[in-house]
Image (tube, rainbow, N blue to C red):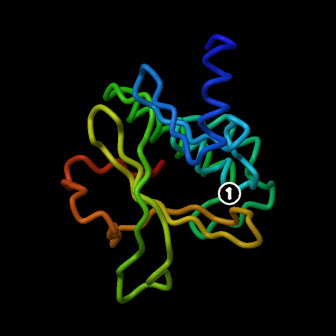
């Protein structure tokens, strides 16, 4: 990006919310300074989930990552595998849609999470993020997940899930 383009983005960001759509279709939300606003660990985890970047997630996730399903090393292995599945299908980033667990039988009922949808193939994964003091303390899949966006189509054959090894 040229300095002139950066200056224009900076001026636009001062007027309000700016979303930069790059040539590959990925979107960046800029703050009033024209920068990507990653102020908390939660912001950063969501940002790098959208960008299929398990290396950055590994660096940012707390060593004491308290998973209900598996430890941090196993989680990184499984999320990397899921990202590989998205990439094999031609996706270069994931779009995020907020939702919640609607199960009536598990302890996650009404827990907030996100559906991450591939930008090319529309494959998706539903994840609950447990947040405490702006830190992600757990990330896990949800099989009874509904989104606020009722137009979001989620066919079962497009769901990408963590693999068991």
Q: Nearer the viewer, residue 43 or 160?
A: 43
Q: Which residue is mark 1?
A: 42
Residue plotted at (78% across, 55% down)? 62
Q: Position of residue 18 (x, y in %)?
A: 54, 41
Residue plotted at (40% across, 28% down)? 25
Q: Is residue 118 above or below residue 163?
A: above
Q: Is residue 1 above or below residue 114?
A: above
Q: Is residue 155 above or below residue 59?
A: below
Q: Nearer the viewer, residue 159 or 68?
A: 159
Residue 143 falls in image quadrant: bottom left
Question: Is residue 62 left or right of 107 when viewed as pictured?
Answer: right
Q: Position of residue 47 (x, y in %)?
A: 60, 44
Residue 65 falls in image quadrant: bottom right
Q: Position of residue 58 (x, y in %)?
A: 70, 43
Question: Is residue 20 left or right of 117 when viewed as pictured?
Answer: right
Question: Is residue 22 left or right of 150 when viewed as pictured?
Answer: right
Kind of element beneath mark 1: helix
Question: Is residue 85 left or right of 121 when viewed as pictured?
Answer: right
């Amino acid at each position: 990006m040229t300095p002139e383009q950066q200056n224009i983005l900076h001026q636009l960001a001062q007027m309000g919310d700016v979303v930069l759509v790059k040539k590959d279709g990925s979107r960046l939300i800029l703050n009033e300074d024209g920068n990507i606003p990653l102020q908390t660990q939660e912001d950063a985890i969501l940002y790098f989930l959208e960008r299929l970047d398990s290396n950055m997630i590994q660096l940012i996730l707390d060593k004491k990552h308290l998973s209900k399903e598996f430890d941090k090393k196993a989680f990184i292995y499984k999320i990397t595998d899921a990202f590989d599945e998205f990439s094999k299908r031609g996706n270069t980033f994931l779009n995020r849609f907020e939702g919640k667990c609607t199960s009536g039988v598990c302890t996650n009922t009404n827990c907030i999470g996100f559906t991450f949808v591939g930008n090319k193939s529309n494959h998706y994964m539903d994840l609950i993020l447990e947040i405490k003091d702006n830190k992600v303390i757990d990330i896990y899949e949800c099989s009874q997940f509904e989104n606020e966006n009722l137009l979001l189509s989620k066919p079962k054959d497009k769901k990408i899930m963590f693999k068991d090894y």
